[in-house]
Amino acid sequence: MKKPRVLLADDHTFVLEGFKKLLEDHCQLVGAVEDGRTLIETTLNLQPDLVILDISMPRLNGIEAAKKLKKQAPAVKLIFVTMHADMAYIDAAFRAGASGYLLKRSAATELMQAVQSVMNDKFYMTPLITKEVMTSFLNPTQTRLATIDDLTTRQHEILQLVAEGLSAKEIADQLKISHRTVEFHKTKIMEQLNVHSTTDLIKYAMAHGFVTAS
């Protein structure tokens, strides 16, 4: 079978190097990136068959990057390799378009199995996910990430940039919108998430994988 063309995305160099060693004999590695926005640009440029990505990445987290990728490059397959084992992240990842989900601590033994499954048009879920989490995932009445999903794409972008320490002016410059629009969105985000300070907003973003705690 033809080797799949794979792009890697993780903001830790040692993780990328580890993935390369695991995959280099079985895949054609076309590149490695360390943030969500570069991931989108590189994917559109290189057109890989598969992207292996983390959830917590700078500039744009993996969930939001996945949503954009599936709109702009719907044929690309996505496997999340992350430290997050709870239902919120699993649910968000698959609804963003993922075909696979595994944990970093088991990547050495599972990654190639996940790649093979996904490239054969199957889904892959790490067996390390607990029974309780799987039950929750399969239950359509289970409470989901309602507070996060209520945010618009623009609000997601602003939340991430606020969490990365950018000022309203810097956010406005980067997103090419007005300072006033940034402040409006930030206020609406805080209302929707029921947080009352920028510090709490940053804590919320870090807790939900919008930015790496480093």
Image: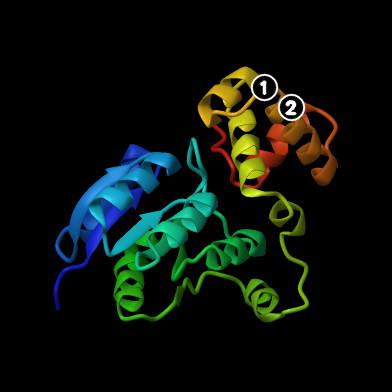
Q: Is residue 188 left or right of residue 171?
A: right
Tell me what residue is drawn at x 57 percent, y 67 percent.
95
**Residue 18 visible in the displayed image:** no
Query: Where does the image place residue 3, in percent across and percent down from the top left?
Result: 16, 69
94 relative to 154 in the view: left or right: left
Disc number placed over residue 113 in the picture, else none: none
Question: Spatial distance from mark 2 to mark 1, Cα to Cα?
Answer: 6 Å
Q: Amino acid at mark 2?
A: Glu
**SS at circle 1:** helix
Residue 186: where, in percent of width, then height? Answer: 74, 33
Q: What residue appears at the point 59 percent right and 26 percent down from the top-left corner?
A: 171
- Give residue 11's quadrant in the image: top left
Q: Which residue is mark 2?
A: 183
Crowd class of label 1 (few under 14; some 14 to 19; many from 20; radius 10 Å):
some
Q: Nearer the viewer, residue 40 or 24?
A: 40
Q: Is residue 136 above or below residue 33?
A: below
Dot 1 corresponds to which residue?
179
The answer to whether residue 100 is visible is yes
The x, y position of residue 103, in whole percent, is 47, 60
The quadrant in which the N terminus is found is: bottom left
4 on left or right of 150: left
Q: Quadrant of residue 190?
A: top right
Judged from the image, the secondary structure of the residue bearing numbered disc 2 is: helix
Mark 2 touches mark 1? (CB < 8 Å): yes
The amino acid sitting under disc 1 is His
